[in-house]
Image (tube, rainbow, N blue to C red):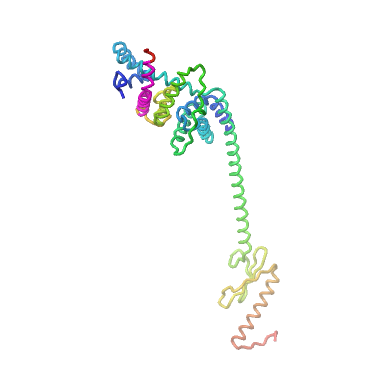
Amino acid sequence: MSDMYPVPDEELELLDAYLDDALSDQALSELRARLAVEPSMMAALRMLRDERSTRQAFFQSIDPTPAEVDELVADIRHAAARKRWWQDRRKLTRWASAVAACLVMGIAGAFVYHAWDKTPLRSNGDTPMVSGNGMNTVSARARYAVEVTDETGNVMAVQHFDNESEANDFRRDVRLMQQRHRQTTHGMTIMDNDF
Amino acid sequence: MADETTELFEKAVRLHSRRLLAIARAVVGYRASAEDVVQQAVLNLFEHRERYDWREPGGLLRRAVVNEALRILRKPKMSVVDEEQVPGGVMPDAAIQNREMITHVRAAIAKLPEHFRSALVLCEYENLSYAEIAKTLDASVPQVKTWIFRARRQLAEMLKGYYEAERRGLRT
């Protein structure tokens, strides 16, 4: 490519750097001295300057007009405003989602707690327990439950009551029934007030 | 804080749009809309505007536009902007000969590899130093020097016939 120019590529690079104002002070003074005595370097410099001026004409031609710039700025402002609006909405949506998630978790937590609260407390040490043969009466905070157990103590059923007297009545009835069942099973006859 | 950033952003856009648009035009040529390139680049920055320092936004904006232009050029499918639609066709005080010459140069510059073209534009249009160009294009200074050197030599080769004709015309 350097056959176009009267100097080799290295010298062209040096001249380009000179035109780009990228030479150190020392390199600049050395080049100026060479340009004064080397016609080939001077000729190459003139060629590079000519080429550069044609490129500059091109760069001037692509310089936008004020109207074009105004239009672009207006477009960017409009698009930026739109983007900001969406960003704000997204931020709001994120907040709303977070609040909704907290609410859902709170409600779910309350539901689970409430459901747990309703379950009979069988062997909780804090809970007063009324027990008898074959069954236990458990007092929870608001309700009473009577557990019906078999002879080995396994719970077969749980009956809930709203007050203690009902629970005790049920317990007594079940106990009587179980006594009769045992008597029948073992072939024993016990004279009782009930007969 | 957010409003201050937006204000600085708008000020930066007003201040730098002209040069950004010219850079985009030089880099993408006929192959995309320079306005779209600038707008997309600037909006990308706006989306994360809190991250940047908008007091000295020249380098940031320039880098964004060049990168966006290069990204667009790398896309496999691109709509070619018609030559008549290319802005900058209006040249005040420009003679027909001058317009013809500009058409030649524009066509030649459009044929350069993207990085050569970007480096050349930043050097000769933006008058940036090699170090600033290297920073903008995320390259080393020697690499930038090579790109600019090759860009100039390739342009000279492509415009050789035009230059020779011009010189012959000047001599006769």
Query: Residue B146's image quarter?
Result: top left
| A144 within the magenta span | no
Query: Residue A39's image quarter?
Result: top left
Vertical placement of residue A182 versus A140, above or below: below
For the stretch drawn in magenta, the main secondary structure is helix
Residue at the far front in the pictured view:
B172
Q: Along the horizontal axis of the image, is B128 left or right of A114?
A: left
The answer to which of A167 and A81 lies nearer the viewer is A81
Percent x, y of residue B56 = 50, 26
Q: Along the horizontal axis of the image, is A50 left or right of B33?
A: left
The answer to which of A91 and B156 lies nearer the viewer is B156
* Image quadrant in which the C terminus of chain A is located: bottom right
* Image quadrant in which the N terminus of chain A is located: top left
Percent x, y of residue A162 = 69, 67
Vertical placement of residue A186 versus B141, above or below: below
Q: Along the horizontal axis of the image, is B153 left or right of A121?
A: left
Percent x, y of residue B64 = 47, 31
- Residue shown at 59%/34% (left/top)? A81
The answer to which of A29 and B29 lies nearer the viewer is B29
Percent x, y of residue A65 = 54, 22
Q: Which residues are magenta?
A: B143-168
Q: Along the horizontal axis of the image, is B153 left or right of A106?
A: left
Numbered marks: total: 0
| B154 within the magenta span | yes
Residue at the far top in the pictured view:
A36
Query: Residue B108's image quarter?
Result: top left
The answer to which of A1 and B141 lies nearer the viewer is A1
Vertical placement of residue B64 versus A151, above or below: above
